[in-house]
Each structure stands twice: as structure tokens, then as C-alpha cells.
Image (cartoon, grey):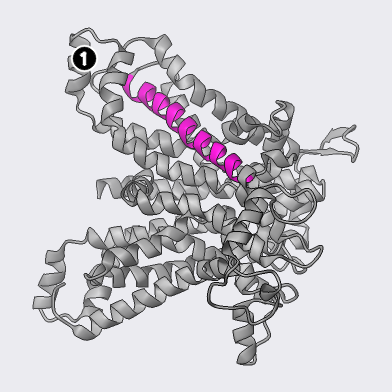
């Protein structure tokens, strides 16, 4: 700080506290709702402090799910989300790092064409080509399957560019030394490049895990059987069920469990998260 | 930038790019080609007769008041989300840059909402604003405002704007904060010595130096409002009431899957793709320059 201005410091703290409260309030209300019984949550005003039904609600939602008939236990949807998030994150990292290695360290006809083909995918998120993408996945028989949930999402320009950027910053001498010593390209990749890319890989993993976990439209489209439902889509789907009396307590317990894994990842891997977010945009 | 030292094994290079290229071709180029193709044909309801109609689907769109209404709504929505979101995040980032004590805790608390999916964020906001049990609705009622997003179109729009901004603030905040911290302290100090107060320093030094970050975030936020908010609309309002929140990306989905209007939906997809391509190019042109900055 340049000069001491107590008023401005107080103002800064005040604004930060107001900001934090506004950002946290929706989640606080969700948590509170998940700790009361159904009847309490149907009377306005709803309580602002936690109640006593926490364990009961979470147990119910984990084992039986939301609703009375044909509900999917949240353990199933959480597991599906986990498989999808890990699949997307790991799959993306593997195919991107290999592609980046090829584009940076080899000269081959069609190299620039590959580069541009990957670049264009940045501009075509799944939301703008919903109907035909669904058609393609249906034609390949990948509806209601884990590959169907994962593979269409793993081509990513951002990850490829991140690794390309990193490889370009690796000193040429290393590749030269490897070649002089007679190491094959794959040997160079595995023994030198991969260990050097550890931090980039970790940063990428955090970002892509959250991306995979938070997918909404894609699982909504390509799952028809409940055993493949993911958590995010289930929360949203149940919020729109207006058949009988809403069980806010159970719905909000489900929302809490759905938010928890990515939030934990962000908080505990904050450094990698920030790095990943900032670097993918370069 | 190119590498001086490269390997010669061509077949290996093709093998290495193959997985990425196969996924890209099958799940990006094929569907996008299909979207373009389907936007140029009509199909009867039973999928039997296809007819090549050139740009009839597009001209139908351009004569459709509902499409223009949705486009106008999308522009207003994107403007609100980007303007309010950027202003709030900038304020928070400037203040966070100022505090020393507790800075890490504030930062952590402002960052984690990024991890909440927009579709889930929408459910949380829907709960707070639920017409019968929402706590905010109850408070508003106390001061004489009736808030019912299920029946009132403007209030529904306001609610999806709020939920969308809430989901995006963490991202904006992080980039603004990084931008602020990269401004050389010596500049600020020099201005202070010359007698410029905090407000003057902000508008004359910090703000101009932050404008590249701001411009980048503007494009990102517009793209987010166009595409990324699908989950918010789908979980909260489903385009209603009476299309008051039916932004373009929602219309593509509902026309295609609910209305079974493949030609119309594909034509809309193609238009939105063109918009995305233009926006991404603007973003990259700018980043090219930022690298040399």
C-alpha cells in the first residue's frame, strides 16, 4: 500500500465482507434447508439457522434418493459424476499432451491443418450444435454408456494449447541432448517432457475435473436410463418436478452433495486451480 | 514460434495426433457439417422426404418475430450479465488488492463459487426466490414488493441474470486481481508522490492498464452469457414465462428437441456458430497483441 488511509482500508474490508456474504448466502441457505424436516421447509419464512435433521436427510438421499417412486440414490449419481469427471479430465490430458507433443516436436505434412482443426473446436461448444451431435452419438450407439458421456467431450483445444505453450518454453538443448544420446522420441517424451510438465498437468486436471463434473446439457441428452444419470443433471431435473409437495430439505441435501467434490478440489488445490485458469487463457 | 530441434519419425507423429484428430473429426466436424446440411434441407415429420431448400430455413427465421424477440432478449441478457458482472468483480478485485490482513481468506471465499455448476447455482437461486418459501421473496414482501418469477417475465429475467452473474464472478475476480497485481507498484507510488489521490490514481493509471484484462473478460463474459448460461435457463425457467427468458441457446434446444423442427433449429445453430467464430477471433486477435505487449 502506498499511503496509510484508514478509511479506505475499512471500506475495503467492508466491501469484501459484503461480497463474501452475498457469494456465500445461497449456499448457506442450501445447507440450512438440508438440515430441517420437510414440513419446516414448507412454511415461509424458512429458518436461517441449521436444524436437527442433517443426518436423517443425507442418509435418506444417499441410499434412496429424492422422491418416492423410481428415485436414483445419490450414491449412484455421484459415482457417475465421478467417473465422468475423471474420464473427461484424464482423457483430455492424455490426448492433448500427445497431440501437443506431435505438433511441437515433429514436422509432418498436415501439421498446420491439424493445428487449425483443433483450434476451431474452441468455437463450437456442444451447446451450439446440440441436435446433430446427439444424432452422431446416437448413430454410433453410444447413448447410455460411459464412453458416450466422456469421449465426445475430451477433444479440447484449451488443453492442447496449454501443453503446446509449455513445450515451446522447454529449452531446445534438452531435445538436442536426447537426440545426440540416441534416445527415441517417446523416450524423450516419457523421461524428460512428462516429468517437466507435472505442474501443467496438475493445473489442467483441476480445471477439467470441474468442467467434467459440472456438465449439464450433455448428460441430460444422452442418458435415458437412471443408472447413468449424473448429479448435476439430477438436481436440476428434480428441481423442475412440480408434481407433489416439494421436499426442499432432500433436494438441497442433494445439491450440497453435488457441489461438495468440485468445491473441495478448488479449495484444496487453489494454487493449481488459479494457475490452470489463468494459463489456459494465454 | 517453432522448435529448432525436431524428430523425424513421421509415422509416430501421425500416431500421436490421431486420437485427438479422430475425436475432433467425429464429434466436432461431423455434427457441425450435419448442422449446416440440416439447415439447408426440410424433412417431413416422419423423416421420409428430405428436400434441399437452400436458404429457406434461414429466410423463415428472418421473417420470424419470435426469433427476433429471442435475439433481442439475448443481447439484453448478455449486456446485463457482462456489465453488472464485470463491474462487481472489478470492485471486489480492487478492494481485495488493497486489503492485506485476511486477504487469503477473502480470496478463497470469493473463488469457490466457480466450482458450482451454473445449473446447480440456478437451483439455489430458485430456492431463495421461490414464490412460496423463498427467503428473499419473504423479505421483499415485507417491504411491499411482490416477487414471483414463475409468473412475471421481467422478474424471471432478473433472476436468471443474478444467478448467471453469481456463477461467473469468481472467474472475473481472479483475472482482475491478477491484472491488478501485475501493475508495477512504482507507477502507483510515483503518482502518489506527485499528489494524486486514490480515486485519481485508479482512473488515470490502474483503469487504463487494466483495460486489456477488461476487454478480454468482456468477450469471455459475452460468450458465457450466450452459451454457458444454458444450464441456468434450463433449471430455473425453461425459457418461460411466455418466452421471457428464452435466449437463443435455449431456443435451439427447445425447437430441436421439443418442437422437432430440425431445419429451423439447425439454421439457428449455424447462426450462433458464426457468432461464436467471430467472438473467438476477436478474443484471439487481442491475445496475440497481449503477448507482444
Near-viewer residue (A229 or A1)? A229
Magenta span includes A88: yes
Q: Quadrant of the N terminus of chain B?
A: top left
Q: Is residue B135 left or right of residue B153?
A: left
Query: Does residue B33 appear in the picture of this structure?
Result: yes
Mark 1 residue element: helix
Q: Quadrant of residue B9?
A: top left
| x then y, percent, for residue A109 | 42, 16
| x then y, percent, for residue B168 | 48, 60
Query: Does residue B247 appear in the picture of this structure?
Result: no
Q: How many marks?
A: 1
Name above or below for residue A112 compared with residue B196. Answer: above
Q: Residue at x 71, y 78 (%)?
A: B132
| x then y, percent, for residue B107 | 33, 63
Q: Chain for mark 1?
A: A
Q: Is residue A80 left or right of residue B282?
A: right
Magenta span includes A113: no
Q: Residue at x 68, y 85 (%)?
A: B146
Near-viewer residue (B21 or A29)? A29
Q: Quadrant of residue A180?
A: top left
Q: Which residues are magenta?
A: A77-105
In the picture of the structure, the residue carrying the numbered disc 1 is A178
| x then y, percent, for residue A174 | 19, 21
Q: Residue at x 52, y 66 (%)?
A: A27
Q: Residue at x 56, y 41 (%)?
A: A124
Name above or below for residue A226 compared with residue B65. Answer: above
Q: Quadrant of residue B250?
A: bottom right
Q: Main secondary structure of the magenta part?
A: helix
Name above or below for residue B65 compared with residue B278. Answer: below
Amino acid at each position: 500500500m502506498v499511503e496509510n488511509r484508514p478509511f479506505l482500508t475499512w471500506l475495503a474490508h467492508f466491501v469484501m465482507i459484503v461480497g463474501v456474504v452475498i457469494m456465500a448466502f445461497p449456499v448457506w441457505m442450501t445447507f440450512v434447508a438440508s438440515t430441517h424436516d420437510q414440513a419446516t421447509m414448507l412454511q415461509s419464512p424458512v429458518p436461517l439457522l441449521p436444524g436437527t435433521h442433517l443426518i436423517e436427510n443425507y442418509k435418506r438421499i444417499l441410499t434412496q434418493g429424492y422422491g418416492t417412486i423410481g428415485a436414483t440414490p445419490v450414491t449412484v449419481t455421484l459415482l457417475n459424476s465421478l467417473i465422468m469427471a475423471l474420464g473427461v479430465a484424464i482423457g483430455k490430458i492424455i490426448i492433448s499432451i500427445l497431440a501437443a507433443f506431435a505438433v511441437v516436436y515433429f514436422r509432418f505434412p498436415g501439421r498446420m491443418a491439424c493445428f487449425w482443426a483443433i483450434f476451431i473446436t474452441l468455437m463450437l461448444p456442444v451447446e451450439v450444435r446440440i441436435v446433430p451431435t446427439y444424432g452422431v452419438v446416437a448413430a454410433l450407439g453410444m447413448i447410455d454408456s460411459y464412453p458416450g458421456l466422456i469421449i465426445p467431450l475430451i477433444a479440447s483445444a484449451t488443453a492442447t494449447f496449454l501443453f503446446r505453450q509449455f513445450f515451446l518454453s522447454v529449452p531446445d538443448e534438452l531435445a538436442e541432448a536426447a537426440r545426440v544420446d540416441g534416445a527415441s522420441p517417446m523416450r524423450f517424451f516419457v523421461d524428460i517432457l512428462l516429468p517437466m510438465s507435472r505442474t501443467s498437468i496438475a493445473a489442467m486436471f483441476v480445471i477439467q475435473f470441474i468442467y467434467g463434473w459440472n456438465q449439464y446439457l450433455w448428460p441430460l441428452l444422452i442418458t435415458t436410463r437412471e443408472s447413468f444419470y449424473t448429479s448435476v443433471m439430477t438436481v436440476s431435473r428434480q428441481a423442475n418436478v412440480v408434481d407433489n409437495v416439494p421436499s426442499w430439505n432432500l433436494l438441497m441435501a442433494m445439491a450440497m452433495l453435488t457441489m461438495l467434490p468440485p468445491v473441495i478440489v478448488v479449495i484444496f488445490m487453489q494454487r493449481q486451480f488459479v494457475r490452470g485458469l489463468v494459463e489456459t487463457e494465454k | 514460434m517453432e522448435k529448432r530441434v525436431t524428430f523425424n519419425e513421421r509415422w509416430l507423429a501421425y500416431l500421436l495426433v490421431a486420437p485427438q484428430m479422430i475425436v475432433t473429426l467425429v464429434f466436432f466436424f461431423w455434427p457441425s457439417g450435419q448442422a449446416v446440411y440440416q439447415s439447408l434441407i426440410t424433412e417431413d415429420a416422419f423423416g421420409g422426404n428430405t428436400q434441399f431448400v437452400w436458404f429457406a430455413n434461414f429466410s423463415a427465421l428472418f421473417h420470424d418475430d419470435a426469433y427476433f424477440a429471442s435475439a433481442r432478449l439475448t443481447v439484453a441478457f448478455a449486456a446485463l450479465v457482462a456489465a453488472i458482472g464485470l463491474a462487481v468483480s472489478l470492485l471486489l478485485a480492487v478492494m481485495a488488492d488493497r486489503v492485506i490482513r485476511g486477504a487469503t481468506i477473502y480470496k478463497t471465499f470469493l473463488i469457490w463459487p466457480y466450482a458450482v455448476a451454473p445449473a446447480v447455482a440456478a437451483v439455489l437461486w430458485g430456492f431463495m426466490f421461490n414464490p412460496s418459501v423463498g427467503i428473499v421473496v419473504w423479505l421483499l414482501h415485507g417491504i411491499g414488493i411482490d416477487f414471483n418469477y414463475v409468473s412475471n417475465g421481467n422478474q424471471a429475467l432478473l433472476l436468471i441474470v443474478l444467478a448467471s452473474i453469481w456463477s461467473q464472478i469468481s472467474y472475473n475476480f481472479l483475472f482482475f486481481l491478477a491484472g491488478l497485481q501485475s501493475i508495477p507498484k512504482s507507477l502507483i507510488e510515483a503518482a502518489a508522490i506527485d499528489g494524486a489521490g486514490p480515486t485519481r490514481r485508479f482512473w488515470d493509471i490502474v483503469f487504463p492498464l487494466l483495460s486489456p484484462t477488461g476487454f478480454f473478460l468482456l468477450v469471455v463474459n459475452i460468450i458465457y452469457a450466450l452459451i454457458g448460461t444454458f444450464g441456468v435457463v434450463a433449471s430455473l425457467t425453461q425459457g418461460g414465462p411466455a418466452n421471457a427468458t428464452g435466449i437463443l441457446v435455449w431456443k435451439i434446444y427447445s425447437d430441436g428437441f421439443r418442437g422437432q423442427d430440425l431445419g429451423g433449429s439447425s439454421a439457428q445453430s449455424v447462426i450462433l456458430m458464426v457468432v461464436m467464430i467471430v467472438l473467438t477471433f476477436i478474443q484471439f486477435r487481442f491475445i496475440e497483441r497481449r503477448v507482444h505487449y
